[in-house]
Amino acid sequence: MIITLLTDFGDVYPASMKGVILCINPAANIVDISHSVPRHDIYAGAFILMACARYFPSGTVHIAVVDPGVGTKRRAIAIKAVSKDHGNHYFIGPDNGILIPAARSIGEPEVYELTNKKLFDQEVSSTFHGRIYLHRWAYISKGMDIADVGRKISDFVDLDFGKGKKLGSVVEGMVIFIDGFGNILTNISSDLISFQPGDIMVIDNKPVVFQRSYGFCKELEPLALIEATGIWRSL
Amino acid sequence: MIITLLTDFGDVYPASMKGVILCINPAANIVDISHSVPRHDIYAGAFILMACARYFPSGTVHIAVVDPGVGTKRRAIAIKAVSKDHGNHYFIGPDNGILIPAARSIGEPEVYELTNKKLFDQEVSSTFHGRIYLHRWAYISKGMDIADVGRKISDFVDLDFGKGKKLGSVVEGMVIFIDGFGNILTNISSDLISFQPGDIMVIDNKPVVFQRSYGFCKELEPLALIEATGIWRSL
Amino acid sequence: MIITLLTDFGDVYPASMKGVILCINPAANIVDISHSVPRHDIYAGAFILMACARYFPSGTVHIAVVDPGVGTKRRAIAIKAVSKDHGNHYFIGPDNGILIPAARSIGEPEVYELTNKKLFDQEVSSTFHGRIYLHRWAYISKGMDIADVGRKISDFVDLDFGKGKKLGSVVEGMVIFIDGFGNILTNISSDLISFQPGDIMVIDNKPVVFQRSYGFCKELEPLALIEATGIWRSL
């Protein structure tokens, strides 16, 4: 079974999550998506998870923990999302929206609040809920049907990046995430953009060349492009 | 077999350790605890290993290499530690104390100096002892009893973080490690702390609110808390 | 099957490469060599790959993507290199020299341009060629003989670090890579160095002590040494 991990825990802390997973399932294949999500940045975490989740095989369990409310009464949720192209994906994490865009990128999400008493960690840790989510996942992975983890809910915290809007010749959108290369990823959908390679766009009052890819621009020259994936149609 | 790695090697260098491990045992499941231990900081390395080791399954081999004395006559040691709760854990690394707190977090350590001639690497590398430790581990993992690696010793370099001390209303302890979030982890044991959530503590002449968890404090407000694990009872 | 990854992608982006690999081969054992190669630095990437590749078992596939020309008409190549000591190693990446020193560290490289129509990704991504290389690799790993990926070529982009040169008492070389510890790794071959431990070398007009290993020098004192591996005989 493949399990992905996305957290804002940085170095060191993810290792004990992995130890716990391997105690439960020594054959688990754990893949780090990132542990460097900007601290407490649910939007960035949601975006990164959405960008990566669908590349993983059917059956993958995605655990995401970016949780400014850790230790308070935040609900924990599990989601199942299914599609013909991507198969079944499972998501486990806090009910703060972080899982929703990724689940929607697969298919219509079925969301369950984790309320089944069996699911609760015996050793309750007030600061490190990452382990609690894992224990809850453990029961699911051991054959508990997702519908038995608790009650199905529709009042989960939703999160939608939108797709920007076009007002005459102006396109307006939101910055979601700045990656390690300095790429500024926005929520502007590619269908709002009608530029051709070589055209000059004006972004924040500065001229920027629209290009098909990085290889076409000079070093240090800013450019705008449509991103690689079907999902990351950022500017 | 699960093998954890903890080093101060940073990027790049751990990959060749993994290559060597996979040559010996292609089925090894290698988990990085951290390769960003502050360079040569045995205390920080010992603390991180102690915090993580017990979450791994019985039978795990923990390899830790933070070794300011690499290339000199530092002894190499192997440790077996056993407990009912955590099973058998093995530790391999330099005799500089780094393995001791983690081994003690499992159970009473049996320490062996690696002296068996068979254990020595044919290609002796003077700077990169990480590989040497791996080769020595290889013989053990291939069925050599740990008692055959060399002589049992009791004069190993010990390392004990202590637990701080209480003098009237003052608690005094030692900073062991500052993590990537800016948490200052100390050796002060939770049984020395009698604060209630909301109480004001004075740390280094500055008032700090004692809280149950991060979710209860405002952004950028310093707080003090008892850490998540039974072991990390830091302030 | 063991697959190593070396990129300049930083955080986040490698995860979707891993997802794609695991879709194709759920049993793949993926090892990160580094994703922190200095952006677009082909020499650094080639050096790191060369330093690590030969420690991996026979049959390993090494995928390296450091590609300033991504999205342009850069050719993609696959290489097979064989030796008695290291077995068969496969390399896949752009034709910009990055794979060559690593392949040569194993044995005489057979280089193929990927031209077989079957090898091309259906979803052509203009910015993220990492996925394209993976898809091409997939056909090879599924049993396509490397000689069927395309035509054998000899006009590949070559990359040779050289070995420095000795002019009287002066040795001249090139800096290839500065690692995270501040080690300045050069292309100067150990056979050009006739110093004994304790001798004083003059590097860039500053005196530096030549030592056998780090353990022999004082803190913050610069030293020069012959590096650990047979390959990294840097100064």
Image (spheres, coloured by chain):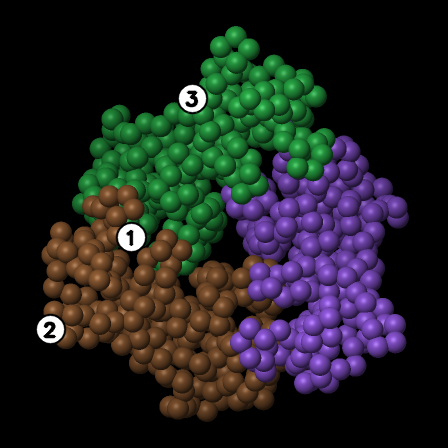
Chain colours: A brown, B purple, C green
Chain identity of mark 2: A
User: How would you rate the neighbour count of disc 2 (Cα within 10 Å): few for under 14, some for 14-19, many for 20 or more?
Assistant: few
Residue B230 is tagged as: none
Q: CA distance from mark 1 to mark 2?
A: 31 Å
Chain identity of mark 1: C
Query: To which quarter of the image does residue B116 belong?
Result: top right
The image position of residue B180, as x and y in percent, is 58, 61
Between residue C11 and residue C93, name the one nearer to us: C11
- In the displayed structure, does residue A135 sit left or right of residue C60? right
Find disc 1 in the rendering and name its residue.
C128
Write the residue at 49% across / 27% down.
Answer: C186
Mark 1 secondary-structure assignment: loop
Same-chain status of marks 3 and 2? no
The image position of residue B82, as x and y in percent, is 78, 61
Q: Amino acid at mark 3?
A: Gly
Residue C162 is tagged as: 3
Identity of the residue furthest to the front in this view? B205
The image position of residue A228, as x and y in percent, is 26, 58
Find disc 2 in the rendering and name its residue.
A168
The residue mark sitting in front, 1 or 2, is 2
Mark 2 secondary-structure assignment: loop
User: How would you rate the neighbour count of disc 1 (Cα within 10 Å): few for under 14, some for 14-19, many for 20 or more?
Assistant: some
